[in-house]
Image (cartoon, coloured by chain):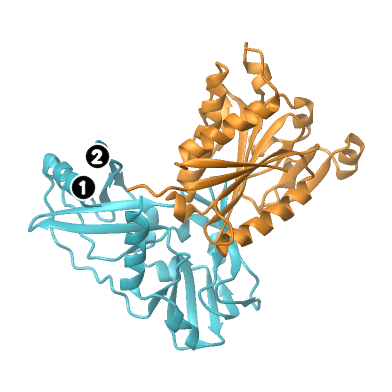
Amino acid sequence: MASRLLWARRAASYLRISTFHRGFSTVIKDLKYADTHEWVKVDGSSATVGIIYCFFDVRTFDQTLFVIYFQDHLGDVVYVELPEVGASVVQGKNFGAVESVKATSDVNSPVSGEVVEVNTELSGSPGLVSFGQVFLPLFYLRKKIEKGCCLCLNVIDEEHVEINLYLLKTFQVNASPYENGWIIKVKMSDTGELNSLMDSERYSKLCEEEDAQH
Amino acid sequence: MRLQRSLEACKFGIINYFDALKLQERLVSDRKSGKILDAILSLQHPPTYTLGKRQTDHNLLVSEADLKTMGAELHYTERGGDITFHGPRQAILYPIVSLRDIGFGARNYVEGLESVMIEVASFYGVNAHAGKTGETGVWVGDRKIGAIGVRISSGITSHGLAFNIDPDLRYFKHIVPCGIPDKGVTSLKRETEMELPPDEVIHEQLIHCFAKVFRFSDIQWKKQ
């Protein structure tokens, strides 16, 4: 992990990228995570559920330079299988699925309860679930970046850095993922279940640990 | 630091699709609870058509009754992907692995499966490649030689790949394979100039390549 960061720093300095700091709140209150990569936003006994699609990992190297490491797990989402309104969901059990690039991934519910709403927009636009969660402050790199884009340096190994200019309609839409990229809304049967979920900090540690193994 | 990871390889003959499905479900559950380590099933199916989660049965060009007459079965499954055909002389691999433990996301996993088939095809002088965006699978020119359909449940994979050694390609005429019209289907037998060894050898080669691509340190062979 350390050598990867070193490489990212070298690559960024080679590109002579400078940045400006845009404040962005990343520790979003009332957002919890399951270790199977679903998020839930809680409001009283009402829960909104979605999936974590990719991870941003931002490191600061000095006053003027920030690198974003981006990992996209699923690929293009082509289909989202939704449950019916009124169906019950159980914490840790699957309630639907997301299909991308010939792989169907089950989605597990972080909470138990009754489905009160499903995001029917996903039938026509399954890509809306593609939500990237930011754990540390997100900095937009200024060089040739338009509003709504970000420049991602994806460090592949010691010798290869992949640079993607992401126009990211998906990310733009999911600047408000809780409005667009959610899958179901649940009336929780037991708010105590939230205690077994992770907060932002623990979840981001889990992702780091998973990442560091390889 | 690389952990030593073992792959348990189970070799079967021809097994019925439904039976293989039940076996996979059991293994996925065992893998999830940590009862077993990563495993891979190697087998073939009797003539069987399968549909994915999206149930795209408009890509089946004959009726279910006709299928029965042909001696083929139809199954609806939970895997990704569109309609496909499985039959004798087509090598099937069903890896039951933990994506987290092998360090792959869904997309990289599918790409890894593609590279396994590409490599084995190359042993026989066949130059195969992955498809364009949205066309998963392995192709020789614009003819499909290998298909992929994967299900991921709490990070554990099931279903997998199907590689055409020398199946009866006429069965593919009754479907729009993988929902991609105007593209043909082919087999290793059709594309190679070399003589093919027994199917078992090709199955083993696929398993060895799988172990290499997904960085297993050793294979434990089990015959059923």
Kind of residue at disc 2: Glu
Protein chain holding label 2: A
Q: Residue at x 19, y 44 (%)?
A: A7
Kind of residue at disc 1: Ser
Who is closer to the viewer here, B210 or A166?
B210
The answer to whether A175 is drawn above or below residue B182 in the figure is: below
Q: Is residue B10 visible?
A: yes
Residue A38 on image: x %, y %: 46, 67
Secondary structure beneath dot 1 equals: helix
The answer to whether A141 is drawn above or below residue A81 in the figure is: above
Q: Residue at x 50, y 74 (%)?
A: A110
Q: Marks 2/1: CA distance?
A: 8 Å
Who is closer to the viewer here, B98 or A96?
B98
Structural crowding at the residue carrying mark 2, measured as other residues with C-alpha within 10 Å and reported as few (<14), some (14–19) or many (≥20): few
The answer to whether A127 is drawn above or below residue B139 in the figure is: below
Would residue A196 be found to the left or right of residue A172 on screen? right
Q: Given contact means CB atoms under 8 Å apart, are the residues at marks 2 and 1 in contact? A: yes
Q: Colour of chain B?
A: orange
The image quarter containing residue A170 is bottom left
Q: Which residue is mark 2?
A: A158
Residue B97 on image: x %, y %: 54, 51
Q: Is residue A144 visible?
A: no
Structural crowding at the residue carrying mark 1, measured as other residues with C-alpha within 10 Å and reported as few (<14), some (14–19) or many (≥20): few
Residue B187 on image: x %, y %: 67, 23
Discs 2 and 1 carry the same chain letter: yes
Secondary structure beneath dot 2 equals: loop
Q: Which residue is mark 1?
A: A3
Q: Colour of chain A?
A: cyan
The image quarter containing residue A213 is bottom left
Residue A39 on image: x %, y %: 44, 70
| Mark drawn on residue B159 | none
